[in-house]
Image (cartoon, rainbow, N blue to C red):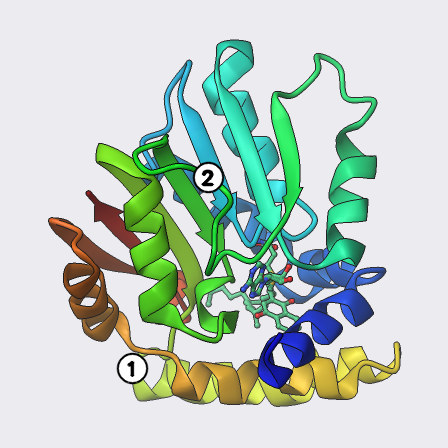
Amino acid sequence: MTDRKSEIQTIFNNIAPVYDNLNDWLSLGQHRVWKLMTVKWSQAKTGDTCIDLCCGSGDLSQILARQVGNTGQVFGVDFSAGLLAIAKQRTQNHYPPLAIDWVEADVLQLPFPDNHFDCATMGYGLRNVTDIPQCLRELYRVFKPGATAAILDFHRPYNPVMQNFQQWYLKNVVVTAAEHFGLTEEYAYISPSLDKFPQGQQQVNLAHQAGFTNATHYQIAGGIMGVLRITK
Ligand SMILES: C/C(=C\Cc1cc(O)c2ccccc2c1O)CCC[C@H](C)CCC[C@H](C)CCCC(C)C
Ligand SMILES: C[S@@+](CC[C@H](N)C(=O)[O-])C[C@H]1O[C@@H](n2cnc3c(N)ncnc32)[C@H](O)[C@@H]1O
């Protein structure tokens, strides 16, 4: 395992106990709306076999599972044992049961055959993987022809007012809130990770390089978030 990979894993295992509550609080509940939009953009339908990459505590997987119903199947994949334990616990007594398999694995080496999935979602994962082109190539490999993925993540707004707001909010609200839980470094990591993250058109180019035929990036929430939609 590379050092960088274990550093990322440690960040997410450390934040697991507070992750869901902080997301609700810091986004004023908006992340739930963004995740619903993401599932809609993935074009998941009844009976589909779908993968939720970097599923964390599993909110997107749950929305996907409701969309595909009990004739479909969702695989939630993540390498954080801490977040996956929360995902499992949140769904184990769900009624009606949700067709979700939780898989502890690296999304850069997916334990699935070629041409297996009808659709995919990924929430706040692509910015955190150590090799974005490899992640897109792996997704392309496991996709059936025609399958669609919707990938939600932070985005740096082009509008300078929104850009300043985002920078101010990440530094003064997000990191300050995290300090109360002893998680300053973990949350301070978001802003520099966003600086290194390819912007919308660059993401589109990377998707084309991985083989995807259609790729479009949509800015949402005033440009502070984005969804990359790609089709094999
Ligand atoms: C959904 C949120 C965070 C996800 C998240 C992603 C990461 O990569 C992490 C890495 C390390 C630690 C934690 C995380 C992590 O939690 C919360 C997003 C909050 C945002 C800063 C957005 C704030 C939005 C406004 C309150 C609403 C603005 C609406 C708009 C202007 C229309
Ligand atoms: C910010 S969380 C997002 C969780 C969830 N998808 C959401 O929308 O709330 C990022 C997740 O990516 C996972 N992750 C990062 N790199 C990974 C990799 N190479 N393989 C598997 N999971 C990875 C982390 O463990 C973490 O759960």
**Pointer 1: residues within 10 angstroms few (<14), some, or many (20+)?**
few
Horizontal side, residue 161 vs residue 77: left or right: left
Q: Write down the quadrant of residue 7 in the picture.
A: bottom right
Query: Which image quarter has ligand 1?
Result: bottom right
* Front residue of 27 and 198: 198
Seen at 28% across and 48% down, the residue is 140
Horizontal side, residue 223 vs residue 97: left or right: left
Q: Write down the quadrant of residue 31 in the picture.
A: bottom right
Seen at 62% across and 28% down, the residue is 100
Q: In this figure, which residue is indicated by the disc labeled 1? A: 159
Find numbered disc 1 in the image and state the secondary structure of the residue it sits on. loop
Do labels 1 and 2 touch, CB within 8 Å?
Answer: no
Q: In this figure, which residue is indicated by the disc labeled 2? A: 112
Reading the chain from its start, which is encountered first: label 1 or label 2?
2
State the quadrant of the N terminus: bottom right
Percent position (x, y) of residue 145? 19, 34
Find numbered disc 2 in the image and state the secondary structure of the residue it sits on. loop
Can you tell which mark lies on residue 128?
none
Is residue 16 visible from the viewing direction of this image? yes
